[in-house]
Amino acid sequence: MTMAPARPSGIGNEARNQPEPPARRPQAGAYPWAMALAISVAVCGAALSLNGVLRGWNWFWPVLTTVLTVSVALAALRSVRAQPLLVTAGGFISLAAVLTLTFFRGSSFLWVIPTGATLPDLDRLMRRASETVLSETAPVAPNAGIVMVVCAVLGLAVILVDALAVPLRMPAASGVGLLALLVVPAMIKPQSVGVWSFAATAAGYLLILACSQRFAPDGQLQSGAPRSPGLARRAALTGAAAMVATLLLPLAIPGFDQGTFPQGSRLNPWGGATGLNPMITLGSSLRAPDGSGRITYATNSPTPLYLRSVTVDNFDGDSWGPDDRTASRVPLDGRIDPGYAVLADEQVRLVTAVDTGSFTSPYLPVPYAPETIRGLGGEWTWDPATLSIKGTDTTTRRQEYVVTSTEPKLSAALLAQASGPVRGIPDDFSRIPGNVPDIVKATAKTVAGTAGTPYQKAMALQRYLRSSEFTYSLQSPVQGGYDGNGLSVLADFLQQKSGYCIHYASAMAVMARLEGIPSRIAVGYAPGRLTGATIAVAGQGALPEYEADARDAHAWPELYFQGLGWVPFEPTPSRGVVPDYATDAPVPAVPDTLGNNDGLVPDAAPAPSATPSGTALPVPGGTGGGEGGSAGVLPWLLGTAGVLGALLLAAAPHLVRSGTRTRRLNPRSPGQSVPLAWNELTDLGIDYGVRAAPSETPRAYSARFRQTLLGEPGGLDHEAHQAVAFLTSAFEHHRYGRPDNSSPATSLRGHPAGQDIQAGVAAVVDSLRQNATLPRRLRAEWLPPSVIRRLGLLLGLPFRAAGSGIRKAARAAAHSRKSRAAATSGAPVAGRREAAADDGVRGRGRG
Amino acid sequence: MEPHRRTANNGSAPNLNLAGVADAVSRLNGHRAAAMDPESFHEAAQRILTTVNTVIDGKSDAAKLALTVLLAQGHLLLEDVPGVGKTLLAKTLARTIDCTVNRIQFTPDLLPSDVTGVSIYNQASRLFEFRPGAVFANIVIGDEINRASAKTQSALLECMEEHQVTVDGNTYKLDEPFMVVATQNPIEMEGTYPLPEAQRDRFMARISMGYPDKEAEIEMLETHQAVSPLAAVSPVVTASDVAAMTTTVQQVFVSEAVKEYTVSLGRATRESPLLRLGASPRSMLQLLRAAKATAALDGRDFVLPDDVAGVAEAVLAHRIIVERKAAGAGENPHSVLQGILSRLPVPQAPPGQATRPAAAAGGRNR
């Protein structure tokens, strides 16, 4: 005989009407798979935007495999209802496995399990990736290293997005993970993310939202919400605010002069384009909105002075880079010998004092050809073949030095005579690369084929490139997809006839080689502008000071003429200054687009009053040093990975908490639903600051919970109040009621349907959120005390164990001491014991 | 107060025939009244409480506790200053039940035989015939029990504990339900015989009525001027109803956790340094019975720790004795019990309970 509830609650009545679903397994079924599909679409869509960062599409297949594998692994684990943390751990394991399968198959065990031998491979690939990043600019060639890094980051992104969308129940916030992916191309690619990629990402994101809404509507969105009347108005307001912000923000951000806001290349606050490799970062330097990497120099040169950092002479391969020739480098002490004899009658000796300021590069910008350099800090070497000067352990940052250089006084006549066969320089400079595109060959033949002497050929090439057919543009290579360097880029350039210095220089250099003239590309600074100040240089008096910055970065071809050495040319229209010897023909008027040719030639009398007194340049310059600026892909990738990792770490308590909640609300057997829900309720109380005292009965705790944390019972929180009351009575019944559940009344109240409990807890959570202050709510959400406390208990476990062990040992020692004492003198101890027993009796009698 | 020593309030004859006694015996020997179904139990309890509350304004807690004690088959000690309605409560409760009610006004010259009954010589049958005393009734109201002499008190107390009367070697069972509601006046103790601890232990609960609050007192002045409210009271349940209700109460389930809680409460009173005398095992039994009745009145078929804690003060406060030092420091039994209850841990998940699998599964959760 049992007693039914005297005042059955409404929820209980509903529960009675619903048949108990047999062995319910909530959330199984299509949900994990649909969510995996949505996440794959979103992440792959975001990955599409990397197309301009990595060249071509070959890299996409490993990326696709990685993303799909991780998604499927997560979905499979979730469909067998593994714990949320286990699912995430499984995601990491599957990521490691698929990366091993793709990149380290040779050193793996069973293709997917990394072994000890994988580590060196990983190190090799990482090194390769970082080399790629340091030595190349976007788009980089998709080598194994960079693709592995990209795959790893995308796999992490899948795990993060999944964690946000499913166990954390914040599908809307999963956009953060996708945004982190889109930031990379937005920052690196001048044309930003791209429409298709953005559309695909957005579609995936919407799919994620739809999946969460369709399969787990108990998340943040309520099913009834779309019908609420103010929604359309709110949506319109939000959209309008976003539009206004998009239009207004660019005005507020300095240097943002072009395009709309999300186009990130204008918005590069790190601006690290003062480039490790002047050649490679040249395009982005030129496009830099502000003049970073400013250097100043003072020179006695009568002609505009080019400062050269490095040369590129190997035209093989996808992407050109400077050849350091580390083996043959010579330490910089004393005179630098160009290694060839110059037969010019007159040589001009130049003295140039350079202050590099914040410009950071391992290569020293100097005028050609340097002879001596004084005042440098750190160790430097020079390459006998190219005379490029490179720091071994230092960079150009904050260097002040004085260079003496010699320059043959060249004339068209001299050059025209220099037609002898080339001797005395390495073959590297005249070797024709293997896979020259046909258009380059054909153009070279058409333009210069008929010319007789090397000089005529060179002039023909320069004339051709400076003709009105070609336009100088920093943007069109980017838009045309041939930004960068290399032979394929060159072919595109010759078709489009639009580009900037690197294209002109490489075109002239390659075509010169095809015509038999040794050539190389010099990279450095075009002549800068007068600052108006003067610098006093020892032995030269006051010299006019010039400044050049990233916008003056330049590349130009140097051709070798026997007897005259390396002779620079200027094929780039509107940039730099065409040397006298190369201006035999009237140069077609080209609009001066950037207008930085002004003031290239110093006035005859530079204004001496600009500075009160030129200070002597300190010869022993400041200590060189500073870290090399690194701009490129890897920092972004690592940064993204770091951000993803940090997000995961920061979300860990929340993840654990919500995972626990989900597991409690979806128990394996219906019999456990009530105690687990009660545990959830007490944990909620702990999170919001009401902890159950040990002497508090469930009923008293529930009353305090409702009074402290919930609002008025009759008002908005009515549902939550009812839910707490219902849960309390169910738990009491479970805890103190009859253990056998056969009788109808007991089973009715002891095992309410899971949905009721879920809905009840959800109502309680909502009500708690609404009634809590903001700090408490944030703490309960993101740093829940229940989790933190459990963590503290867990961490304190070894200490407590040690403490109890010590106490036990102390007791044992005391005991053995006592027994030893008893062995030596038995009677007194026995007497004491009796006395103790008497005390005990008396004490009990009184108590 | 009515001056006469013994009065039968009820129209029904106070004399019980032997058949009635036999009926009571048979009921005790297994033929229990069938338990009442929950709806009628609740309804009956509500009827009783409503009726009592119409007579005594603003004392619903005391009324409920009195009913609890009745259903738990205990005895009630009402202790308070004169004029707050002790006797009225006892009489009202008795009047709501259609059963025999006797009232004994205790005085110093009351004899034990007046309570238990006496054998007198029947001239006609030439036999000694037992004339039942005032205690032969379902509800016995003992007014000012502390005014009677110790031996008279003892006579009543034997009946309370044993539910039987032994006169001249013959044992007579008392009718069920049987409840003694005694009142005691804590002031004017001159020339009285306050109940010693051993006898107070027989009462399941002691209630202090306390003064009514302002509104209740105003209302009382308003309604109770002309006519005695008691006159309007008519029985709402029968004695067999009450017997069925007590059976229901007996069948209320007590879980291991609640037993453990009760026992640890008792042990805490015995171990408390503030108390000279802790709660006895019998008091534990009565505490649990009172808790069961509370649970049943609350509409449950199982006992909560709340039920135990709720009746603990009423059940235990008159049995424990505060240490003199503690009493000097201002402690009284109620404050000590409240302190113990506020510190006593509620067993959450003891081993070997039905919750065990849940605890195992939820162990990680907690």
Image: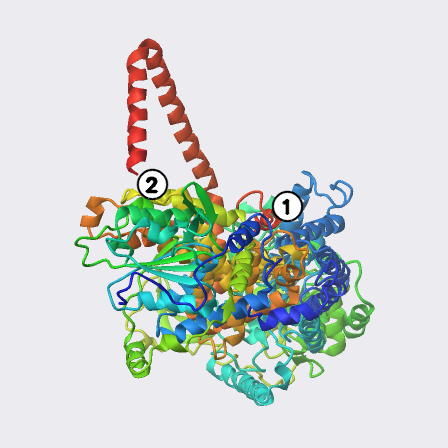
Q: Position of residue A35 (x, y in %)?
A: 71, 66
- B62 relative to A110, above or below: below
Q: Secondary structure at mark 1?
A: helix
Q: Which residue is mark 2?
A: B271
Horizontal side of A612 relative to A185 (left or right) equals: left
Q: How far apart are the two marked residues, 2 and 1, measured between alpha carbons?
A: 69 Å
Q: Which residue is mark 1?
A: A123
Question: Are labels 2 and 1 on one chain?
Answer: no
Q: Residue furthest front?
A: B124
Specify the subunit that label 2 lies on.
B
Residue in view at x 58 percent, y 57 percent: B33
Q: A236 or A586: nearer the eye?
A: A236
Q: A831 or B281: nearer the eye?
A: B281
Q: Amino acid at mark 1?
A: Asp
Asked if residue B209 shows in the view, the reply is yes
Q: Position of residue A468 (x, y in %)?
A: 69, 84
Q: Secondary structure at mark 2?
A: helix
Q: Position of residue B279 (x, y in %)?
A: 36, 45
Front: mark 2 or 1: 2
